[in-house]
Image (cartoon, rainbow, N blue to C red):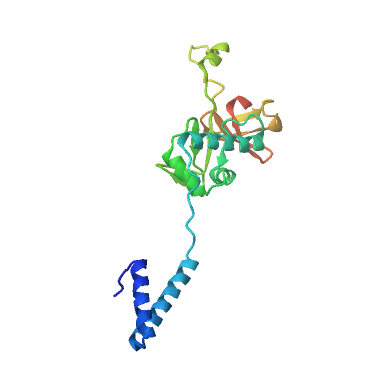
Amino acid sequence: MAIAISEELFKQIQIYLLTLSEQGDPHAQELLTEMQHQEHARADISARAPVPQTISPKLSQAEFAQKLFNTWQDLAKDEIGENFWSYPIPIGDIADAMEMEAEALVHYLTNFEVDRIQLIQARGHNYQIGEQKAASLTFHPIAHPHTRESKPSRVPPKSENGILIEDETAFKVGDRVRVNNLRPQYANLSGTVSQVISVSCRVQLDNGWSAFLPNHCLDRI
């Protein structure tokens, strides 16, 4: 039966056996040899054991939220330019850019609340973040009341029988759309809406590409 003893007690026993061994006690010599073998075995196990990784540098909620947003913004700008709002970036890519393990990023996302963020589930691998599953994330801009007031209000047109026609800035899966000049790299390309997420759409373009675009960059055909 194995008995756990402290390191200090182990050393004391070892010194005692060493003293008896020097006096010619054969039993003490055998026990001392066995203890030395055990000590070497423990040292080998410790050397082979993986060094536990820290989750990541500790960040406060405010620090994490700001670092997460800055990282997402930089990656989204690299992908699509200045019209980066609502563009999803894979969680793994964000973790790499933040120089932390994906599990650490998931840990922060689970425990910290971040304004304007949206977690997006996808086919394939998703991370469990609280009660949600997500493969990527994005941020949406803040709608400022004074900004809305500065723009002329848009009155939806009416049909002849007085029923309001659906707002043409809202899209649904299956709609045919054309990318306008607000997204130059895709301008004038047409396609079909394959996914609607908040104020953005994933569009399967006729040329075979797939693009995730804010509604204001799309015109209904």
Report x, y in % for residue 48: 49, 67
For residue 80, side relative to residue 14 (left or right): right
- Where on the picture, by quarter, is residue 202? top right
Q: Is residue 184 above or below residue 49?
A: above
- Total labels: the figure holds 0
Q: Is residue 129 above or below residue 163?
A: below
Residue 126 in view (yes/no): no
Quarter placement of the N terminus: bottom left
Residue 26 in view (yes/no): yes
Residue drawn where x is 48% and y is 47% of the image: 104
Residue drawn where x is 52% and y is 24% of the image: 142
Of residues 184 and 155, the one nearer the viewer is 184
Of residues 51 and 87, the one nearer the viewer is 51
Q: Is residue 125 above or below residue 42?
A: above
Report x, y in % for residue 107: 45, 45
Quarter placement of the C terminus: top right
Report x, y in % for residue 118: 49, 34
Report x, y in % for residue 180: 67, 26
Of residues 142 and 217, the one nearer the viewer is 142
Residue drawn where x is 52% and y is 11% of the image: 160
Residue drawn where x is 52% and y is 33% of the image: 197
